[in-house]
Image (tube, grey):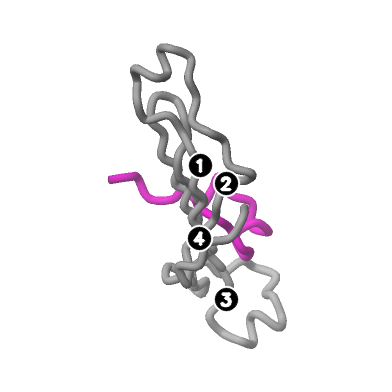
């Protein structure tokens, strides 16, 4: 569990925007996967989106998380501790691979 967001630490002009929370996973200090989700924070009312009010209305902000389209980037790492002690590394690919929300893999 995490504490709720402290809005006093965010500039109002930064609340209405697109953000990307990232989750990274590492093993023995080596990142092997990164998952990101696009999040759009905007006013729920079209009129407020067109004509931004002078006073910020946090209770009218809607968060849209594209949870069905995560961006997954995979990195090759050495999972075998005994190999890393010998100084062996996994063969590096040309580029890390990225999987889009449709499950299709693309170079990152």
Q: Which is more foreground, mark 3 or mark 2?
A: 2
Identified at 72% across, 81% down, the residue is: 51
Q: How many marks?
A: 4
Question: Which percent across, then down, holds residue 1?
Answer: 27, 45
The alpha-carbon separation of the residues under discs 1 and 2 comes to 5 Å
The alpha-carbon separation of the residues under discs 3 and 1 comes to 37 Å
Q: Which numbered disc flags the more N-terminal residue, 4 or 3?
A: 3
Magenta span includes 65: no
Q: Which residue position holds label 1? A: 75
* Furthest-left residue in this view: 1
Q: Which is more foreground, mark 3 or mark 1?
A: 1
Q: Which numbered disc flags the more N-terminal residue, 1 or 4?
A: 1
Q: Which residue position holds label 3? A: 43
Question: Which percent across, then down, holds residue 56?
Answer: 61, 66
The alpha-carbon separation of the residues under discs 1 and 4 comes to 12 Å
The alpha-carbon separation of the residues under discs 4 and 2 comes to 10 Å
Q: Which numbered disc flags the more N-terminal residue, 3 or 2?
A: 3
- Callout 1: SS: loop
* Furthest-bottom residue in this view: 47
| Residue 16 higher or lower than 33, as above or below | below
- Callout 2: SS: loop
Q: Which residue position holds label 2? A: 96
Identified at 57% across, 46% down, the residue is: 96
């Amino acid at each position: 569990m995490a504490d709720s967001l402290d809005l006093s630490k965010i500039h109002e002009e930064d609340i209405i925007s697109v953000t990307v929370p990232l989750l990274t996973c590492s093993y023995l200090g080596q990142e092997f996967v990164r998952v990101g989700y696009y999040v759009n924070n905007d006013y729920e009312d079209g009129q407020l989106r067109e004509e931004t009010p002078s006073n910020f209305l946090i209770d009218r902000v809607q968060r849209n998380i594209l949870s069905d389209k995560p961006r997954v980037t995979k990195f090759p790492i050495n999972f075998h501790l005994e190999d890393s002690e010998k100084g062996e590394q996994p063969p590096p690919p040309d580029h890390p691979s990225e999987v889009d929300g449709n499950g299709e893999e693309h170079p990152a």
